[in-house]
Amino acid sequence: MGKTAFCFPGQLQERPIFNEGHSLNRDPRFAEWLENVSRQTDFDLIHFCFKREEAGVNLKLQMATYLLSMFHFFRLQAEGWVPDILAEHSMGVYAALAAAEAIRFEEGLFLTESIGRLLERESASSRETMGSIIGLTYEEIATVCQELEDHSISIANYNGSKHFVISGDEVGVEKAIASALSKKAISASRLSFNVALHSPRLSGLRQEIDGLVNDIEIRSPKYPLLNHWTVGLLKTEEIKGFLSQEIGQPVYWDRCVERLIREGVGRFVEVGQGSTLSKLIRWINRDVETFSAGDWF
Amino acid sequence: MAEVNSELIEKLKQLIITRLKLVDLTPEMIENDAPLFGEGLGLDSIDALELVLGLEKEFGVIIPDAEVGKKVFQSVRTMAQYVLDQQRTL
């Protein structure tokens, strides 16, 4: 079996719907937890809205992602699960830090909302987006990006040998998607984002994020936490710098999974709604065990 | 156009279950004509990549691009028809 890694996914791409038959609605802990959460945030997870200052869909998806990851983490803990190591993908870092007790739950909420609002502001002044390309190799994607040099398209996520996410201006990303399809990609499509996340285009936010994290007291992570950019274990003193820079740097998820396997991980638990990370891990290594806490309970 | 047979349908259902590690599913639970993506089996584009590789490895059949993939992966029956058509042209 090996060690167990808890993996915290990045932003959901669709609004979670909690209809009557939803598994979380059958868990009385969920209602109780939501009631507690509603005292700590202006965001209403069930109705997918902010109670006072309304926001765009991406910020709401980021809030929902954080909250659902944290709920699934608490539920896993209550069932007796203990991770040997944590890993995170993109904005999953806030929930991973809170789960590792490097920051408090409410500080994770604060960071998710504050950084999300910075991204919303950026999106108002620029026309940027991201696209998912599946079925081409790194060399083929790199060629697609190079051929569009006027648009500064960059690879934002290295999710596997044939799965990449690109970031850039809207026109450039649309052209890259068309180019990828002409090069026989299995799938190429725009994502919901309206900023070029994990690209140098967002490096200018560093000082403002520094200001947001400055007052937060970072504690030593309770579990080793592998970061998506340098693919190293985050030391306490590195966390603030990581948070202010990672948004302008790529996500190397393929290398994270390979490193975790080298560390002896044989079981990957996706701590959130959906199973995107589990599917990416399945592609990287079919021999390890993967499952999503959202599907499992 | 040759008719797909139940043996091929069964093999393809098994391929879907194995490649996608759908451990809670049995071939009987997958309907021949149900959509594989979205509302049906709920597969997505990451799953499609696995199925493309699976078809190539186990049936020697290539899905050349997204357009063909969309048509082939509509249901188990459309997958079977494509496998049959491709194997006859080999």
Image: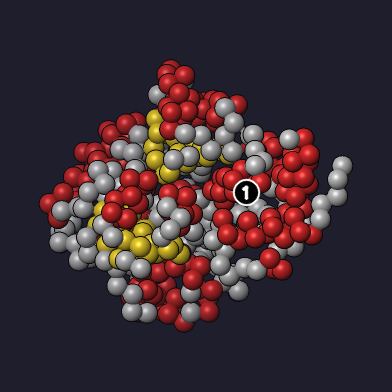
Per the image, the residue denoted by label 1 is B58
Front in this rendered view, residue A9 or A40: A9
Give coordinates of residue B30: x percent, y percent.
Answer: 70, 63
**Type of amino acid at the residue the image marks with label 1:** Glu
Residue B9 picture quarter: bottom right
Residue at 59% x, 31% y is A184
**Label 1 environment density (alpha carbons within 10 Å; few <14, some 14–19, many ≥20):** few
| Residue A136 screen position, x and y as percent | 51, 34
Which residue: 55% across, 29% down? A180
A150 relative to A76, above or below: above
Depth check: give the residue in front, A141 or A190.
A141
Outermost residue on the left side: it is A237
Visible in this render: residue A168? Answer: no
Where is residue A27? Give x, y as percent. Answer: 48, 79
Locate residue A191 relative to residue A29 in the image: left or right.
Answer: right
Task: Kindly give the residue lying farthest to the bottom in the view shown.
Answer: A28
- In what element is the residue under mark 1? helix
Indicate whether B54 appears above or below A52.
above
Judge whether residue A205 can be spotted in this image: yes
Above or below B23: residue A237: above
User: What residue lies at 73% left-to-right and 53% top-to-bottom?
Assistant: B75
Viewer-side residue, A154 vs A204: A154
What number of labels is visible? Answer: 1
The N terminus of chain A sits in image quarter: bottom left
Which of these two is toward me, B55 or A85?
Answer: B55
Location of residue A83 with respect to A190 vertically, above or below: below
* Colour mapping: secondary structure
Left or right: A186 in relation to A83: right
Subunit of mark 1? B
Residue A110, image x, y percentages: 30, 57
In which quadrant of the rendered view does residue A5 lie? Answer: bottom left
Identity of the residue drawn at 57% across and 27% down: A183
